[in-house]
Amino acid sequence: SVKSKKMEVWFSKEAMTVAEKMVKPIKMCRKLIAVAMAASTGERAYEPKYFREVFQELSRRYDIGFVLLGGKDASDSVKHFKDLEGFCLDLTGKTSLPEAAAVISLCDIYLGVDTGLMHMAAAQGKPVVEISHSLPDARSTDPLAVERTGPWETEFIALRPDKELDSCTRFCRMKFPHCINQIKPQRVIEAVECFLQKEDG
């Protein structure tokens, strides 16, 4: 019989030691948010300038640090945040997968697109704000629907584009950031605040 449907993720004590050293420069913040901006396919990536708005506004309202994670493909986006080093920590391309999982364990919330990192966060029970490229007309049985590929067995808010653009139906069909960029920063801010206020309440 199935006793648990939860996912699991493991990392060593060594990975945790590395993670703690990496996060130390920003650990003084009251809350840490793990962020993944890029994904393996372009249509799932979210505009860096919108993330910048989110970071600036949330850091203005709360004592929050943002830990930027991902592979080398995410490193190109980080140049947009060089002047935000006081509350943005760039770990893109600098961690192994176990180290990334350990870093996420030190964070309070996951914010970002549909990536393996999102599922690592879900496996650790972290609240997730997913910025999704799945469209309003998506069927729950679609291979890329939030209902099928979204965070598993954890609290989450999935933000979807308002409508399909051009020839896209059910999910974005382009190979670059397209439909997903309809999701305005204010919606992302409000979703993150839902979890921040819940924890504080």
Image (spheres, helix red, strand yellow):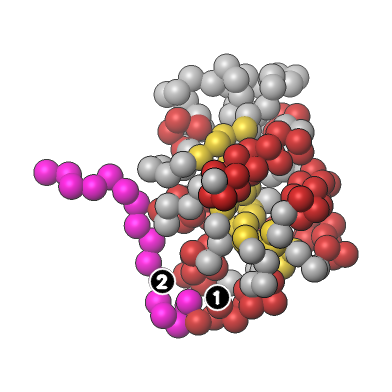
Residue 109 at x, y = what percent? 56, 53
Q: Residue at x 62, y 57 (%)?
A: 33
**Magenta run includes residue 10:** yes
Question: Which amino acid is tagged 1?
Answer: Ala
Q: Is residue 55 above or below residue 107?
A: above
**Magenta run includes residue 11:** yes
> For residue 132, what is the image quadrant?
top right
- Mark closer to the chain start, 1 or 2: 2
Labelled disc at residue 145: none
Q: Is residue 95 above or below residue 117?
A: below
Alpha carbon separation for disc pair 1 and 2: 11 Å
> For residue 89, what is the image quadrant?
bottom right
Labelled disc at residue 11: 2
Q: Is residue 123 above or below residue 149?
A: below
What's drawn in magenta, residue-wise?
Answer: 1-16
Q: Residue at x 71, y 34 (%)?
A: 187
Question: Which amino acid is tagged 2?
Answer: Phe
Labelled disc at residue 19: 1
Residues at circles 1 and 2 in contact by the CB criterion of under 8 Å: yes
Callout 2: SS: loop
Answer with left or right where residue 10 lies relative to residue 46: left
